[in-house]
Image (cartoon, grey):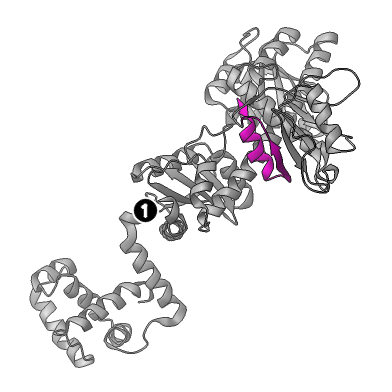
Amino acid sequence: MVTLDRLINVLGGYGVHLQYCSTSRSTELRSVVMHEPGQVIGDVLLAVGAASAAEAIEWAAAARAVVVLVRSDAEPDDGTVPGEPDRIAVMAVDPEVSWSDLAAVVYGLVLEGRETESGRGPTDLFALADSLAEAVGGAVTIEDRHSAVLAYSRLQQHADPARAETILSRQAPERLRAVFAERGVFRHLAESDDPMFVDGDADHGLTGRMVVAARAGRELLGSVWVASAEPLRDGRRTALADGARMVAMHLLRSRASADLERQVESELVIRLLEGAADATTVASRLALPQTPLRVIALRAHTTDERHAALLLAFERATAGFGWSRPGRSALAGNTVYTVLPGAEPAAARAWAAGLRAALPEPVTVLAGVSGPATVAELALARREADECLALHEVRRGGAVPVYDEAWDDILLQRLRIAAQSGRAPKRGPVAELREHDRANGTQYAHTLRAWLEAQGDLAEAGRELGVHENTVRYRLRKMAEVTTLDLDDARKRLAMMIELAASEDLS
């Protein structure tokens, strides 16, 4: 259920600010109305056409509204609210915000909240699929524009194996989509609002389908499918077309609500990741617990397209109405950032794996996870997640790196980047040994690294190199003829070890 507090917080990022409130912000909102001749009753009143704040408040009182939205240029010059009305909140709408845009947002927010709690409200997609199935006399499936199942009817008339498989997998199988593409179904949905009949195909468990686009203006939002052995006629065909328009309205309103949620959430998360001074307050608005948090940095792409996969990943990361998701996400540049509660790295890796599983097969997902952090440390955690992501990109696979497990690899990666940018020493023992190896085919640099890693144990270094310890001893003597090693100096041994590790890709 949507509360007044949530409405205030969400609309605050949309050009609407709270002017006055004399009622509890925990009050639940169930309906939205506009002023019109005759009596209207509702919790949220959009005071479209009000000449002043006083007139808007009069309308709100008559409608028994909890909150009234009025143009900010209709406010009194002194910024006060006339009469200080009892048990009502007044919100001022900036002049540049259109009433039509605001109405879509408010209707979506309030009505979607009601339907989420009730489960099967009057515009719930499953309820709509049920009523449409009864009207057309066949099992109904509602899909988005990517063929993912959004809802389906309980009625099973004319249902077939293909429908059952589509519902179970939550998406039309690839082989079935290929059949529809071959028959021009997707091309028809992109171009026409008329229902189309698709003949059955026994090889694919398909008895037949009527399908129609759910479109808002020129934009295809989804499609409605009816299991039918033959084309629908007359009234049933009209009912299907009307039902598709109702589905489009639901999807449009739902998307408006979800997009606003994503915008507000993304802005708040970015403030946390940038080290906001009011981080505790921001975390509270995001409903993040005062427990250890981790930052996940994630990128997604396909071989021929980068942006679409990233946007789809962000959509999946923020899927779900309200605050039911465990993490809070933002899209910044070419990276999706998610702040996830939990001190254990397994939860973060499971989250990344779950998101990858929800994306189409061709999409490549790379990610990095920060160490555990408090709310005040999230800016540092973001940098850790970025470095882990960069490490995953270098490795191109394997487990998602977590900072507290991979800090040593990250340190070496920093040094490698510095070396690759031309900051590796051009002279000195390591550089001179490598130059000798290139010119003479020797393995002195590799031998030196094995000896240093074995902490001077000739037998251990030999096992690592696959040679006898005397060979290691001989090579060390020959190295001393090429350059000055100073192996008795602990600082020089440390410096050589760092240089060997940082510049190994340059050898």
Q: Which of 394 and 317 is in front in this view?
A: 317
Q: Which of 313 and 449 is in front in this view?
A: 313
* Residue 3 shows in this picture: yes
Q: Where does residue 293 sit, x and y in percent of width and height?
A: 41, 47
* Residue 186 shows in this picture: no
Question: In this picture, is 42 found above or below 491?
Answer: above
Asked if residue 166 is among those painted magenta in the image, a careful observer would answer no
Please tell me whether mark 1 sits on a helix, a strand or a loop.
loop
Q: Where does residue 6 sit, x and y in percent of width and height?
A: 62, 35
Mark 1 — residue? 371
Q: In which quarter of the image is residue 69?
A: top right
Question: In this picture, is 248 found above or below 330?
Answer: above
Q: Is residue 46 left or right of residue 428?
A: right
Q: Which residue is drawn at 56% across and 53% down?
A: 270
- Quadrant showing the C terminus: bottom left
Type of residue at label 1? Gly
Asked if residue 3 is among those painted magenta in the image, a careful observer would answer yes
Q: Where does residue 55 sit, x and y in percent of width and height?
A: 86, 32
- Quadrant showing the N terminus: top right
Dot 1 crowding, Cα within 10 Å, few <14, some 14–19, many 20+: many
Q: Which of 452 and 98 is in front in this view?
A: 98
Q: In this view, does 156 lie to the left or right of 247?
A: left
Identify the residue at the far front of this view. 83
Q: Which residue is drawn at 78% across and 29% down?
A: 45
Q: Which residue is drawn at 69% across and 10% down?
A: 138
Q: In this view, does 350 lie to the left or right of 329?
A: left
Q: What's the magenta region?
A: 1-24
Question: In this picture, is 421 found above or below 115?
Answer: below
Q: Nearer the viewer, residue 380 or 493?
A: 380
Q: In this view, does 72 lie to the left or right of 29?
A: right
Question: In this picture, is 435 found above or below 159?
Answer: below
Q: Where does residue 70 sit, x and y in percent of width and height?
A: 80, 38
